[in-house]
Image (cartoon, rainbow, N blue to C red):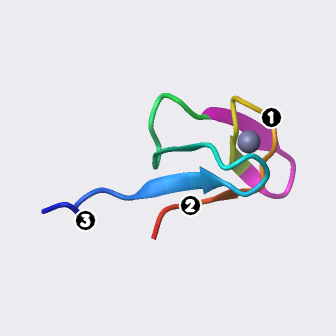
Amino acid sequence: MASARTDSRCLSCGFTAASGGEEWAEVEVPKLGRLTQCPECNSTNVTSGR
Ligand SMILES: [Zn+2]
């Protein structure tokens, strides 16, 4: 049960929150589409769960 939900983690500052959660910001990038952005350091270098 503990592994039912996945977390995303910022590789730059280590911020962690639920994947797709409201904690994360989102940015639209041409060609790449929607990326998850860290609210702490504004990095898009974020692991997407899993
Ligand atoms: Zn960060």
Neighbourhood count class around disc 1 (C-alpha, 10 Å): few under 14, some 14–19, many 20 upward:
few
Residue type, numbered disc 2: Ser
Label 3 C-beta lies within 8 Å of the nearest ligand 1 atom: no
Amino acid type at mark 1: Cys
Label 2 lies in ligand 1 vicinity (Cβ under 8 Å): no
Q: Residue at x 19, y 60 (%)?
A: 2
Which quadrant of the figure has residue 42? top right
Distance of label 2 from label 3 (alpha carbons):
15 Å
- Vertical position of residue 5 compared to residue 18: above or below: below
Q: Element type at marker 1?
A: loop
Indicate the secondary structure of the residue bearing disc 2.
loop
Of labels 1 and 2, earlier in sequence is: 1
User: Closer to the observer: label 1 or label 2?
Assistant: 1
For label 2, the crowd category at 10 Å Cα-Cα, with few meaning under 14, some 14 to 19 and many 20 or more, is: some
Mark sitting earlier along the chain (3/1): 3
Q: Quadrant of the N terminus?
A: bottom left
Residue highlighted by disc 2: 48
Name the element at disc 3.
Answer: loop
Residue 34 position (above or below residue 5): above
Q: CA distance from mark 3 to mark 1?
A: 27 Å
Q: Which residues are magenta?
A: 25-33
Name the amino acid, label 3: Ser
The verdict on label 1 being within 8 Å of ligand 1 is: yes
Return the residue at label 3.
3
Majority SS type along the magenta span? strand
* Structural distance between the alpha carbons of marks 1 and 2: 17 Å
Q: Is residue 20 above or below residue 50?
A: above
Horizontally, residue 34 falls left or right of residue 9, namely right
- Which residue matches tag 1? 41
Q: Position of residue 49 (x, y in %)?
A: 48, 62
